[in-house]
DNA sequence: GCCGTTTTCGGCCCGACTGTTTTCAGTCG
């Protein structure tokens, strides 16, 4: 069983206990354990086999015993007992914004409603507003959120889809002897969410490939299947579409699978204009291309990377030889948004820095939360100073690697920052972010953020729009006005690589580039493992057509130092 | 639930906002 799956069980346990009104600290301990398990680099099974679970901070005797039960039997009795009392659909209700354990409990007990669908029906019939503590506004909000959720229905975060696709691809190579397996579709274009996983497989024995895939533990059901392809429902709720081709046709099939539809449509038109329709993939005849470069060159185009294939002007740019020179992960020289155990991170400054060195970075910025973010143990000016002293001492024998003193300072609801200016002035990297009062009106929020953009001591604005993909909308914000201010002041904007944020998104980042704004691609990592999420931010940058010069942390340390000084 | 060299028991968690109230409970970060 994977770490994330064990973690998930404790999350669910915590949610159910919260519904029952159990002790806050017990629930927090389960949540904490889930977070620790998800962040473990080693497999929890390995640690368990060595009998060293309790050596992990945050895992005590009780939770270790539960992990033991999970890994031995594949289930947890306590969880199953709770699920008999409270249907899991009630947990879905609890996941709606504004609905916590108390309200979900009231809805379940008073209306007998135990799924999102039933709740929508009850709300439409006006039965929710009569419940204690709820009124018309709550009822409307519930309906709005459910509708929004239905609209985005069925889309999975890119990171989840990539993980599953990677697992299945490895399996097909190892077990079914497929020579090549790759995910096409929106995964290959690094779109932020994914509908279905599209796998392209090279093999001379499609029957065997499909048989073996069917036997994979993640595959729950065959939706359809023929000689060359199949569609399968997975246990993670995502559908996997598989196409098996012979090796000669692999590149063509991958190209077609990658899309996007709009991009292929544009190419098709171009091909017809050149009288190339019979030669062009998508026509009834399939041609074996050696690689995608050949496909593009038969249309008179240079290679277009998958991230650009969205019909957002890339074909025209290619025709005019104006495609951007995209950078990649290897160009990233440091991470400028890192949390540690000084606030709500899991690991020490030393460990995060050591990992950054292993990655070949030249620098990182330690940017823990500021004081008002109590839940994250935000740093008071006094503790911040202490942390910065500590960092300076670590830098003393640093042989070329540099840790920047930093802070992620809250932009307070009334504007202004959550840390005295004289301290910010001495801090090498200041990120300013919104973490409270998300529901302010558009003008207030815009003015609030612009106040930070204009602050001379602020280097970077963190996760500008505050969205959490599939969970929380952007706050009301006039992005255009903020971009204008950032361009005027030379303030850097963050591309947050956290797969549920990706904020700026590709569209906003491209608008920022057009205005000459510089950006930083950062992970916002709260533990070692999440420092690995940089590729997701890099993908946003690529989808936004950014080049090296647009992104400050492609600069080496000496150059970055100059950029930061200039502000 | 976890943790611990001042403690094996008692601390761990806080303030703002919202919608519902008519003085506050629930939710959120």
Image: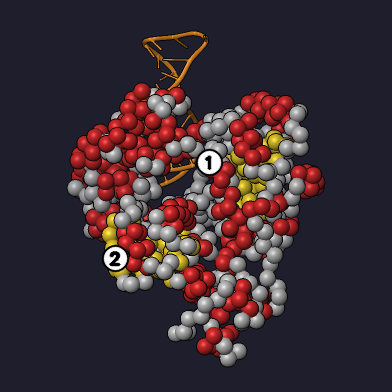
Residue for badge 1 = A529
Q: Is residue A288 above or below residue A154?
A: below
Give the quarter of the image for residue A426: top right
Question: Which percent across, then down, holds residue B24?
Answer: 35, 33
* Residue A270 visible to the viewer: yes
Percent across and percent down for residue A517 are: 70, 57
**Same chain letter for marks 2 and 1:** yes
Can residue A371 be seen by looking at this rendering? no
SS type, badge 1: helix
For the point 57% across and 85% down, the residue is: A271
Q: Quadrant of the N terminus of chain A?
A: top left
Badge 2: chain ID: A
Q: CA distance from mark 2 to mark 1?
A: 35 Å
Q: Which residue in the structure is indicated by mark 2? A: A223
Position above or below: A316 against A363: below
Rendered position, A425 above or below A317: above
The image position of residue A231, as x and y in percent, is 34, 66
Q: Which sits in the foreground, A291 or A100?
A: A291
């Amino acid at each position: 069983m994977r770490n994330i799956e064990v973690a998930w069980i404790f999350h669910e346990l915590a949610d159910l206990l919260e519904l029952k009104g159990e002790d806050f600290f017990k629930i927090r301990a389960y949540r904490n354990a889930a977070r620790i398990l998800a962040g473990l680099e080693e497999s929890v099974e390995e640690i368990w086999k060595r009998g060293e679970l309790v050596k992990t901070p945050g895992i005590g005797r009780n939770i270790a015993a539960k992990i033991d039960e999970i890994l031995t039997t594949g289930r947890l009795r306590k969880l199953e007992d709770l699920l008999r009392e409270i249907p899991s659909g009630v947990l879905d209700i609890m996941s709606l914004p504004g609905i916590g354990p108390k309200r979900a409990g009231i809805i379940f007990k008073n209306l007998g409603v135990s799924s999102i669908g039933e709740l929508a029906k009850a709300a439409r019939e006006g039965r929710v507003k009569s419940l204690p503590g709820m009124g018309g506004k709550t009822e409307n909000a519930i309906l709005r959120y459910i509708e929004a959720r239905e609209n985005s229905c069925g889309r999975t975060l890119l990171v989840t889809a990539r993980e599953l696709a990677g697992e299945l691809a490895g399996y097909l190579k190892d077990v079914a002897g497929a020579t090549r397996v790759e995910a096409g579709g929106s995964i290959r274009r690094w779109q932020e969410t994914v509908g279905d996983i599209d796998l392209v497989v090279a093999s001379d024995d499609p029957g065997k490939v499909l048989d073996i895939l069917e036997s994979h533990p993640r595959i729950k059901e065959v939706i359809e299947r023929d000689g060359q392809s199949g569609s399968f429902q997975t246990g993670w709720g995502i559908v996997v579409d598989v196409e098996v081709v012979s090796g000669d046709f692999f590149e063509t099939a991958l190209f077609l699978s990658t899309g996007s539809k709009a991009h292929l449509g544009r190419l098709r038109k171009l091909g017809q204009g050149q009288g190339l329709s019979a030669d062009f993939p998508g026509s009834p005849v399939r041609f074996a291309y050696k690689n995608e470069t050949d496909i593009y060159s038969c249309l008179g185009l240079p290679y277009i990377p998958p991230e650009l294939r969205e019909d957002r002007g890339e074909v025209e740019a290619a025709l005019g030889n104006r495609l951007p020179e995209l950078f990649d992960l290897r160009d990233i020289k440091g991470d400028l948004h890192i949390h540690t155990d000084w606030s709500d991170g899991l690991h020490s400054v030393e460990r995060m820095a050591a990992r950054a060195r292993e990655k070949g970075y030249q620098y990182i910025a330690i940017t823990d939360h500021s004081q008002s973010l109590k839940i994250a143990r935000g740093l008071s000016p006094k503790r911040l100073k202490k942390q910065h002293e500590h960092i300076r001492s670590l830098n003393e024998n640093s042989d070329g690697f540099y840790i920047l003193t930093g802070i992620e300072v809250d932009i307070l609801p009334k504007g202004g920052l959550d840390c005295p200016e004289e301290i910010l002035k001495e801090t090498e990297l200041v990120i300013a972010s919104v973490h409270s009062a998300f529901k302010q009106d558009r003008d207030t929020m815009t003015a609030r953020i612009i106040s930070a953009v204009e602050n001379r001591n602020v280097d970077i604005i963190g996760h500008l729009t505050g969205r959490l993909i599939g969970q929380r909308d952007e706050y009301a914000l006039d992005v255009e006005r903020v971009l204008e201010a950032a361009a005027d002041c030379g303030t850097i904007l963050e591309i947050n690589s956290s797969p549920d944020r990706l904020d700026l998104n590709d569209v906003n980042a491209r608008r920022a580039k057009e205005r000459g704004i510089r950006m930083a691609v950062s992970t916002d990592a709260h533990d070692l493992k999440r420092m690995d999420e940089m590729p997701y931010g890099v993908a946003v940058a690529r989808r936004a057509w950014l080049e090296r010069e647009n992104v400050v942390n492609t600069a080496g340390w000496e150059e970055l130092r100059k950029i930061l000084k200039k502000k």
